[in-house]
Amino acid sequence: MLKDPALEGRAREISKDLRCLVCQNQSIDDSNAPLARDLRVLVRERLTAGDSNQQVLSFVTDRYGDYVLLRPPFKATTLFLWIGPFVILAIGGVRWHDDRGRRHRPADRGRAAAPGRPAPQGQSLMLFWIVAAALTAAVVLLIVPPLLRKPEGAAEERAAYDLEVYRDQLGELERDQGRGLISEAQAAAARAEIGRRMLAIADRGKGPVKNGAKDAKKGKPTAARTPRSAMALAALLAVLLPLGTLAVYGKLGRPELPAQPLASRNLDHERGGPPKNVLAAMDKLKAQLAETPDDPQGWAILGQAYAKMGRLPEAADALGKAVALAGDDLELLGSYGEVLISANGGTVPDEARKTFDRVLAKDPTEPRARFYAALARFQAGDSKDALERWSALLAESHADAPWVPIVRTQIAEAAKALNLDPAKVTPEPLPAQQQPPVAQNQGQGQGQAQGQTEGEDQQQMIRGMVDGLAARLEANPDDVDGWLRLSRSYGVMGESAKAIDAARKARERAPQRPDVLVAYASALLSAEPRSSKPGPMPEEAVASLRQALAAEPDNRDALWLLGLNAAGIGQTTEATDLWTRLLAQFKPEEPEYTLIRARLDSLKAGG
């Protein structure tokens, strides 16, 4: 409440015309809402600053819109506020009259309208067109008038706003000087600068008047004109908006259009689904698989079709059956793993991780499996292992490989998670491959030669990746996991001596790690000649396995291999003990449980 009774009276007079935006039908003086209190304070602040009543109202409406006024002005932007209640009242009145007429015409129920007499729904249809026309006109009035507004209005409003800001700055300046925050010289300089800016605004406001006087002498009109482009756009909208609305309704919304029962509609086509012939082919394939469920190729085709349609759970189920029937197909395993990840929203589930680990067990250089295996570790919180895997993949890939950009991105994310500089931990890929252009119109013999060349190129690419890994390890020999990957790669390529040497270097750097000890023993065993008769394993391999088992008593690989060695040399009791400990780590429904159980039964039978 203001101390000056005159200002307080003006404040109350202004408050009677302002609406509480929370209560909506009360003035800000009658409302106890927090927003109403803020508006009351704002009004008194503006009056204290020297504003007139109209300036206060203009300031509030500029901030909150015309709706803040209890009696908003009648213009395009407030048209609905004025005509909305009458339109709703008219709709309700016509509807009430129509329902009342029906109750008093029982003879109309159950029979058709007489010739020359409008159908009972005619009034409702007429009401619809009235309301549609009113709404269309309201929309046109909301859009067109702003385009026809004269440009000087906005300039005048902007000038008034700027002057208001400068007046506020002068008041703030006086208050700062009174509190001793600035000196008299500083206040005078700031006051002069603000005055200069206010004069500049006043001069801009007088400009049109001077120009108008000159134009008047020449017989030209002095009023500002709406740009022709705005007038053309307004006219175009005023014509096209109603016509376009009518055209769309005439095509899609006419009451006399026949109904579209759900059963007769092709919902898959409406939703952008596959054509009917594709669905028919899939139904035929499913029928064939029902008769011959042991067809891995059929399940693979069905799963890939489901994946393209976005039906990921069904795709995963079909590809899972294909993998169960043809588990050695690396491409099929990779597709199955990718679909599992997509069906899980981008997170690598445990089944997908195991699938890609199976791929890497057969081909440690397979890039897709290496990428997703690293992603699984990253999502599980092992950022260090993921970074090492992605770095190794990037270092062994050629620069033009399609997966290089996304691997770089993942390396950066893993580095940030470990608080490392991505630039320092991101290795450089191998040089881009130079692929010679393939001539067109080649004969069959040339095609076969090309196929052999492509096979040789693929082997060379793998060899290049392995050699790149070996060169990187020579420069950084402390990378134990890198030596393990190199050992596995040499083993897949059939180079046993190099595989043993790489595994030995890993053991030298991590002699207590169970996985390193098992890898070294496996490399030694892989170099042994194949034999159908069981026999003792190399002493060095057995010693490495026993050391791994001592470090990790539940190590599955060590328990299995030592059990094989014990069974091969006739130590049945030791083999039974080792395999029984291993069996306890699997569930009865897992295939490993069945295999170990069979081996134990064979030992008991004396086999």
Image (spheres, helix red, strand yellow):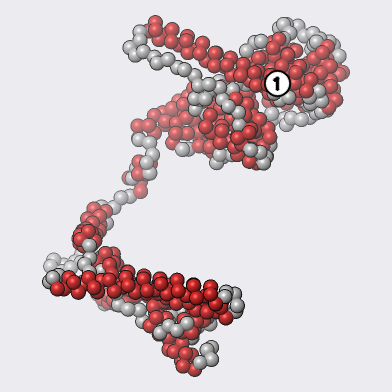
Q: Position of residue 308 (x, y in %)?
A: 44, 34
Residue appearing at x 35%, y 79% in the figure: 72
State the residue lying farthest toward the front. Answer: 185
- Given the current orientation, which residue lies at the most extreme bottom position? 5
Q: Is residue 112 above or below residue 247?
A: below
* Residue 235: % across, % down: 20, 62
Residue in front for this viewpoint, 354 or 533: 354
Residue lying at 62% horizontally and 12% vertically, measured from the top left: 493
Q: Locate the C terminus and report the quarter of the image it occupies.
A: top right
Residue 113: percent from the left, percent from the top?
19, 66
Mark 1 residue element: helix
Query: Which residue has dot 1 on it?
Result: 483
Number of other residues with Cα within 10 Å of mark 1, as a class: few under 14, some 14 to 19, many 20 or more: many
Comparing 7 with 257, the one in front is 7
Which corner quadrant of the image does residue 59 belong to? bottom left
Q: Estimate the x, y position of residue 11 in percent, counting from the top left.
A: 46, 87
Is residue 43 something that shows in the picture?
Answer: no
Q: Amino acid at mark 1?
A: Trp
Apparent side of residue 107 relative to residue 199 in the rendered image (left or right): left
Given residues 464 and 84, the one toward you in this image is 464
Residue found at x 42% / y 86%:
14
